[in-house]
Image: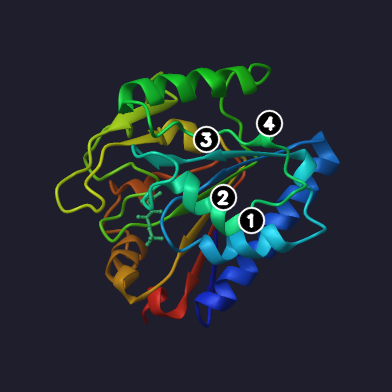
Amino acid sequence: MRVEVFADRAALSQAAAAFIKDAADQAVRQRGVFSLALAGGSTPLETYRLIGLDPTFPWGETQLFWGDERCVPAEHPDSNRGAALKALGPPEALPSDNIHPIRGRLSPQEAAQDYEWRLKGFFAEQGRPAFDLVILGLGPDGHVASLFPGGPGLSEGSAWVIPVAAPSGIEPQVPRVSLSLWAINQARQVLLMISGAAKAPVVERLRGGEAPDLPAALVRPQEELVLYLDRDAAGD
Ligand code: 6PG
């Protein structure tokens, strides 16, 4: 695991954009394709804007996925797909066929099945969801993607994608669809982006090893877990 702390969210966003660009260049050099799963939430939006503006980003070779989605139409302000694509631009160089959203308009069960089926087609050769990079945010309760503490998708199983009911207190209160923990852990790299003082208490718990069962503590990708925090989230 590699942990880096940045002065503020702007610095974190820039560093994350550079990290994603490096991962993309390396994947394209080695395998000719870069499979990237984006996070929902607000923290990575500035990073998406920065990579969307980067004329040297290999968009033609990038295949874009999402780690989770809220079950709302793409035009809805709570849609992870809508928010990410708006922040990205999306860049003209990204072919529309390379965009693989979770269909939030469907019921959670249908959307999960549909997404799992499309992922199994895309990763047919590997036989597992071997994303080059999965980006995650961290919820104040320790959730990542839509994997909530004590919720579904955390134990070893055959599901790549699961439907999830929003636990009470989680906004927005809509059902979600998420990669399972197992699926996230098949990725080569995971970049966990954490910003703001509201995240400091959960970061503290994770750091002290007091919360080994929190979803964020269970993320173990195949090659590297990278944590980018700003100073407010890192606390002391
Ligand atoms: C979602 C997410 C979720 C998010 C965290 C952090 O759909 O809500 O994927 O896991 O990344 O809740 O959200 P913020 O970046 O907005 O704090």
Residue 193: % across, % down: 49, 61
Q: Say what amino acid the circle numbered 2 marks.
A: Leu
Label 2 sits on residue? 85
Q: CA distance from mark 2 to mark 3?
A: 10 Å
Residue behind mark 4: 97
Q: What amino acid is at disc 3?
A: Pro
Q: Amino acid at mark 1?
A: Gly
| Amino acid marked by disc 4 | Asp
198, above or below 222, in the image: below
Give residue 166's position: percent from left, percent from top.
22, 42
Q: Which mark is residue 89?
A: 1
Q: Secondary structure at mark 3?
A: loop
Nearest the viewer among 86 and 163 is 86
Mark 4 and 3 residues: CB-CB less than 8 Å, in contact?
no
For image coordinates 25% across by 42% down, the residue present is: 174
Residue 53 sits in which quadrant? bottom right
Q: Would you say the residues marked 3 and 1 are in contact, meaning their CB atoms lie under 8 Å apart?
A: no
Left or right: where does residue 59 sit relative to residue 129? right
Against 232, residue 110 (above or below) is above
Say what secondary structure mark 1 lies in.
loop
Q: Residue furthest left?
A: 168
N-terminal label among 4 and 2: 2
**Mark 4 nearby-residue class (10 Å; few <14, some 14–19, many ≥20):** few
Name the spot of residue 47 as percent of width and height, x first. 59, 63
> Is 76 placed left or right of 132 in the picture?
left
> Would you say the residues marked 2 and 1 are in contact, meaning their CB atoms lie under 8 Å apart?
yes
Inter-mark Cα distance, 4 to 3 = 11 Å
Label 3 belongs to which residue?
Answer: 101
For mark 2, give the secondary structure.
Answer: helix
